[in-house]
Each structure stands twice: as structure tokens, then as C-alpha cells.
Amino acid sequence: MVTLMSVVKTRKVGGSLVITLPKKLVESKKIKEGEIVEITVKKVKIDGFGVLKGMKPFTAQDELTTHD
């Protein structure tokens, strides 16, 4: 099994938290709507170091923009 990593932000829909899978991930894994996928969740501490250094806060526009 090949593992792809992506950092995404949760958002609230009704009483649930949801994430959006990036287009590149969906296309590379050929994931289709309605399929069952397995995810591993790791909470990322935003402390200014590592992968998130210099990353700006997510905006509503980020959610609407496609991620190529």
C-alpha cells in the first residue's frame, strides 16, 4: 500500500467535522464518490516549525479553490 500525506483543515458541517481530500490525492488514488477509504488522523500542532512554517490561516476562499 502506498501512503500519501496531506495536511488539511477540518470544518464543521451540522454536528460533524469534515475534511476535503485534495484533488491530486483523489486523482492519484482514483477515489470515487461513495467509496470507502481508510484514514489515519494525526493532530498537527501549529507552532511555526516544520511543514506549517509560514503557512497562513485557511480562509473561506481556500475551501472553494481547487488544489492542483
Image (spheres, helix red, strand yellow):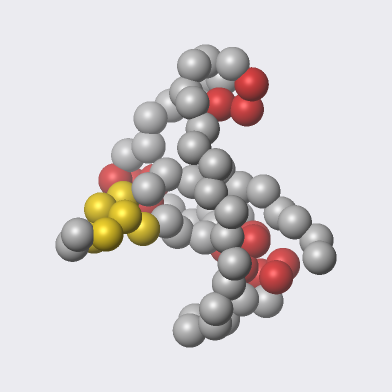
In the shown orientation, is residue 3 left or right of residue 59?
right
Residue at image coords 75%, 56%: 3
In the shown orientation, is residue 45 left or right of residue 58?
right
Residue farthest left in this picture: 14
* Residue 5, percent from left and from top: 67, 48
Q: Name the quadrant of the N terminus.
A: bottom right
Residue farthest bottom in this picture: 34
In the shown orientation, is residue 66 left or right of residue 59?
right
* Residue 14, percent from left and from top: 18, 62
The residue nearer to you, when weighing 60 against 12, is 12
Q: Is residue 28 above or below residue 60?
A: below
Residue farthest right in this picture: 1
Residue at image coords 31%, 55%: 17
Q: In this view of the protein, can residue 64 be seen by the observer?
A: no
Q: In this view of the protein, can residue 1 be seen by the observer?
A: yes
The residue nearer to you, when weighing 22 against 35, is 35
Q: Total marks drawn? A: 0
Q: Name the quadrant of the C terminus.
A: bottom right
Q: Is residue 2 above or below residue 7?
A: below
* Residue 15, percent from left and from top: 19, 59
> Residue 39's image quarter?
bottom right
* Residue 11, percent from left and from top: 31, 50
> Residue 64's image quarter?
bottom left
Residue at image coords 58%, 72%: 37
In the shown orientation, is residue 61 left or right of residue 31?
left
